[in-house]
Amino acid sequence: MLLSFLSWFCTSLFLNVRGAKLPEPEVKMEVLHKPLLCHRKSKYGDMLLVHYEGFLESNGTMFHSSRVHGDKQPVWFTLGNREVIKGWDKGLQNMCAGERRKLTVPPALAYGKEGKGKIPPESTLVFDIEIMEIRNGPRSHESFREMDLNDDWKLSKQEVKEYLQKEFEKHGYSANDTHHEEMVEDIFKNEDEDGDGYISAREFTFQHDEL
Ligand SMILES: *[C@@H]1O[C@H](CO)[C@@H](O)[C@H](O)[C@H]1NC(C)=O
Ligand SMILES: *[C@@H]1O[C@H](CO)[C@@H](O)[C@H](O)[C@H]1NC(C)=O
Ligand SMILES: [Ca+2]
Ligand SMILES: [Ca+2]
């Protein structure tokens, strides 16, 4: 949780410096398998655990399979957080755990003009993706409720500080009030957009207008 909180914070910094919006091409998606039971559907801010295979559309070559390559483990990422290519952030919403989708992702929503590793420039990519597990992310409603100790639907500096302290203690770091206060100031600089001294539920919840 500490790491996800810090990554939330860093992502926020990153989001604030991003440029203007352009109209974007679409991801084509096809449901390959849908489980009978579906307790919840993936939404922005959720952490997803996925297995996937990626192919070049041009000639069908597989460039990566999480089941075959590396440590053969499925991978975690936060949906809607730009941790993965845009095509995944767009194409993996409203999925159930156990669901499999085929996504066809145009280069602009993948690795674009530059390509990456085995992926040549301007490649359209095809993914076969299975969601193994869905968890609440650091930006979730549930995380907000946990941090909002007095249930007034906004986070005070004190509440954020207490949350940080708990997280640091949980991970075995010694208490350092000065350091925590500096972190809180940094967080508020980025998150308290209207400058009222509180992070509202709206300010906390992920900004997805660009996705
Ligand atoms: C498929 O295309 C990639 C990239 O252009 C190339 O590296 C690879 O050798 C091709 N594979 C086959 C089987 O043609
Ligand atoms: C506490 O944090 C401050 C600011 O980050 C740092 O300068 C100081 O050395 C830290 N103190 C201890 C005891 O770690
Ligand atoms: Ca509160
Ligand atoms: Ca505010």
Image (spheres, helix red, strand yellow):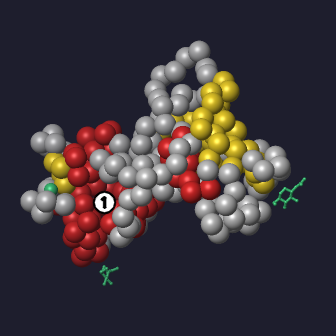
| Residue 131 appears anywhere in the view | no
Q: Within the image, what quadrant is residue 97 found in?
A: top right
Residue with the most extreme left position: 196
Label 1 sits on a secondary structure element that is: helix
- The x and y percentages for residue 40 are 46, 26
Compare residues 51 and 25 and report the one nearer the observer: 25
Residue at screen point 63% across, 30% down: 30
| Residue 211 appears anywhere in the view | yes
Q: Residues within 10 Å of mark 1 (few under 14, many from 20)?
A: many
Residue with the most extreme top position: 36
Q: Is mark 1 within 8 Å of ligand 2?
A: no
- Left or right of 8? Residue 98 is right
Compare residues 93 and 103 and report the one nearer the observer: 103
Residue at screen point 73% across, 61% down: 119
- The x and y percentages for residue 88 are 56, 46
- The x and y percentages for residue 96 are 54, 28
From what the image shows, is residue 201 above or below residue 114?
above
Residue at screen point 24% across, 60% down: 191
Residue at screen point 78% across, 54% down: 63
Compare residues 145 and 203 and report the one nearer the observer: 203
Identify residue for label 1: 164
The kind of residue tagged 1 is: Leu
- The x and y percentages for residue 10 are 40, 66
From what the image shows, is residue 85 above or below residue 126?
below
- Left or right of 49? Residue 151 is left
- Left or right of 164? Residue 67 is right
Q: How many marks?
A: 1
